[in-house]
Amino acid sequence: MHVTVDLVVLTVRVGEFLALTIRRKLDPFAGRWALPGGFVLEREDLVDAAVRELSEEAGIGSMRTHLEQLRSYGQPDRDPRGRVVSVAYLALVPDPGEPTAGSDADAAAWKPVDSLLRSRTLAFDHAAILRDGVERARAKLEYTSLGAMLIPEPFTINELRAVYGAVWGREPDARNFHRKVSSAEGFVEPTDETTTRGGGRPARLYLRGPARLLHPPMLRS
Amino acid sequence: MHVTVDLVVLTVRVGEFLALTIRRKLDPFAGRWALPGGFVLEREDLVDAAVRELSEEAGIGSMRTHLEQLRSYGQPDRDPRGRVVSVAYLALVPDPGEPTAGSDADAAAWKPVDSLLRSRTLAFDHAAILRDGVERARAKLEYTSLGAMLIPEPFTINELRAVYGAVWGREPDARNFHRKVSSAEGFVEPTDETTTRGGGRPARLYLRGPARLLHPPMLRS
DNA sequence: TAAATAGTGTCTGTAAGACACTATTTT
DNA sequence: AAAATAGTGTCTTACAGACACTATTTA
């Protein structure tokens, strides 16, 4: 019985909610798009395998990445090569630019989550894994500060709000969002810098705060 | 690489929050207490393996059982036999009475969760798995109706409240709990029966309702 | 009638959700 | 000055949390 890790890597870029995909070089599913992943080495911890694949297959370092175990997938026929149980990980990263394809892939690309879920493009059971990862991310934005992991620092409150809009498919109200985020202890830390990159009045820039949980949660309603 | 399932099976009996343990017959850890579990068969789905172990090792049928995947554990040295990745499942069951030991165990017993977590009695990394399962159960009681899976039907509101007290280590306020549970659509369904098994004024009996999520949640505070 | 448990109503405080105007910049 | 975006305050409503008394049974 073989064990793999598969990665749901999510980010937001210019208002679009994106997942990282690779085009497979080898069979099975050669030429098809899939989630990055690969076999766990004989003496390697699961999370180490996930970190390694993230780096090897997509050139993403683990420093600014939130990485958590999602769940495992083990239907007997999910891989035509034989019995393969996959432990899926969810990674949330601030937009790292264009991905670089690793050795097992002939291309890597960020693709919109919605179109990946609607079309049947992904190999294996990766559409189901992606769906679970996306749902986990959507849910966790409600009761954690993980939304800030999807955006490069420093960011404005409205840029952060746009991240929530992209992930949830619906923008939170600007005034309520501002009140919630800035009054939640340790969610974001103000700097004394501002930016005018959005045009108009300068917006204050923030860094991620130390808090991980958001209490009480912010509901998508 | 081998794949096993391990089971965190939880129930509440006379106000005590209990986990199912077995005493191992074979090495490694022969004679030690452990969570029930075993190897996944070559053509068996993960959840089927969990259902089978629940039945084989503990004599618990899947009919009245809530079963969900917890997470996977794969540290390279977690099993002295070699590389074994374990997919853990969480089961919540209404008190099924004394367990019957299966073939791989020379005893099976319900033990208080707190003492299992305090003492170092469990084999492998099962203490960590149990801790994660218990935390999942405690969290899910907040935003689902799963508390009702820990008690046999029919039950009174106060019996259900005692379940929450046992799991959380703190009884919710009787009046607020009654209001919350009975006003939440589909959480519990009243019957027209009553019981006096608690002594005092007869209490109305309820069955589990169809709702799975509790909105808004009931916090342990 | 005393003891035991079941069942309910009120008040207060917190925070979500809906909503509109003022502030500060660039062109 | 017009256009663009940032930033904030008020009102209403929902509901959690604290709290005490009445109701119905058995012994």
Image (cartoon, coloured by chain):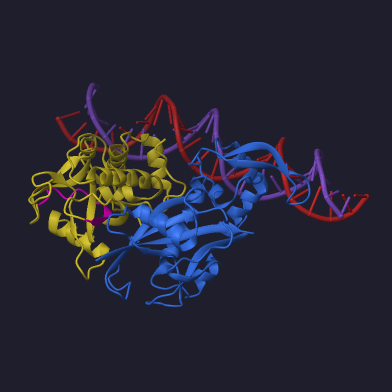
Chain colours: A blue, B yellow, C purple, D red
**Residue A17, quarter of picture:** bottom right
x, y percent for residue B58: 14, 54
Q: Which residue: 64% across, 37% down? A: A190
x, y percent for residue A19: 51, 63
x, y percent for residue B69: 31, 56
Residue B158 vs residue B216: left or right?
left
Q: Give the range drawn in magenta.
A: B83-100
x, y percent for residue A66: 47, 50
Pick whichever, A125 or A165, lies toward us.
A125
**Residue B217, quarter of picture:** top left
Q: Which residue: 50% across, 75% down? A: A119
- Residue C7's place in the image compared with A44, above or below, is above
Residue C22 vs residue A107: left or right?
right
Residue B115 vs residue A7: left or right?
left
- Rendered-image quadrant of the N terminus of chain A: bottom left
Pick whichever, B143 or B75, lies toward us.
B75
Q: Which residue: 27% across, 58% down? A: A42
Q: Is residue A172 magenta?
A: no
**Residue B181, quarter of picture:** top left
